[in-house]
Image (tube, grey):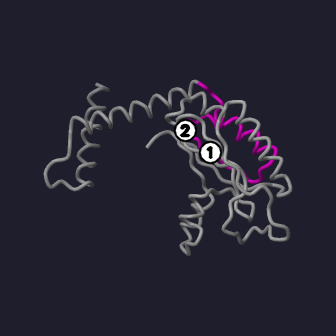
Amino acid sequence: MGLSIHYSGSISNPGCLSELINEVQDIAAVYNWPCEIYECKFPENQYSRNTYSDKIYGISFTPPGCESVFICFLSNGKISGPSQLELFGNSEIETDKRYLYIVSVKTQFAGAEVHMVVVHLFRYLSQKYFARFNMSDEGNYWETSDENVLHENFKKYSDLLNSFSSAIEKHPFQTNESIEKYFTRLLEIIREKKHRGKK
């Protein structure tokens, strides 16, 4: 739970991977964000849209309070990450294969300013290095470029998390209550509280 971005796409030119890594590393250094560099060069004569190896290519960085942001690819040039490869890389299930190529990053606890920097970075990279890039931004900043909309969405998510934390403290598990029944009861309490607040 928490405001996140979700993105997918592919690198437009495999020969530009080192340049992309260097640029991202330089930008992260400006903010003192730690980086991790993976493979820097796609294997020769193996770049394919249909198959991939067990290696990750690209770079990740981690702003304070934020999950790591992976600007990484599989050997077929499609955006992915270490967790996606581990969880879905060997799956034969078609729906799982879709998740192999979607990366999600929670920015909720990093704040709106970090969220904006990350979105601007992706906007820049998508124009210079990516093909068929898509982003779904739960803060709606990618779609609108409106800081007020982003701040409102951060507030909504923070209020929801605070309500949920407060509800957990005030309403602990009951004896012999299953986890499903507990969360159903908790959500009903939160909805009822919200409904009373609107009146």
Q: Residue at coordinates 59% horizontally, 68% vertically from top-left?
A: 89
Q: Quadrant of the C terminus?
A: top left
Q: Quadrant of the N terminus?
A: top left
- Disc 1 and disc 2: Cα gap in Å? 8 Å
Q: Is residue 60 above or below residue 158?
A: below
Of residue 188 and residue 162, the one placed in the foreground of this image is 162
Q: Is residue 125 magenta?
A: yes
Amino acid at pointer 1: Val
Residues drawn in magenta: 118-147
User: What residue does disc 1 label?
Assistant: 69
Q: Secondary structure at mark 2?
A: loop
Rendered location of residue 123, percent (x, y): 73, 39
Q: Residue at coordinates 69% horizontally, 53% vertically from top-left?
A: 72
Amino acid at pointer 2: Cys
Tag 2: Cα neighbours inside 10 Å, few (<14), some, or many (≥20)? some
Q: Secondary structure at mark 1?
A: strand
Rendered location of residue 80, percent (x, y): 65, 57
Rendered location of residue 12, percent (x, y): 81, 55
The disc at residue 66 is 2
- Among all residues in the image, which is located at the extreme left? 175
Q: Is residue 182 magenta?
A: no
Give the side of residue 17 with respect to residue 4, left or right: right
Q: Are marks 1 and 2 in contact (CB under 8 Å)?
A: yes
Q: Residue 163's image quarter?
A: top left
Q: Residue at coordinates 70% horizontally, 35% vertically from top-left?
A: 120
Tag 1: Cα neighbours inside 10 Å, few (<14), some, or many (≥20)? many
Q: Is residue 1 above or below residue 84?
A: above
Rendered location of residue 160, percent (x, y): 38, 35
Of residue 141 and residue 43, the one placed in the foreground of this image is 43
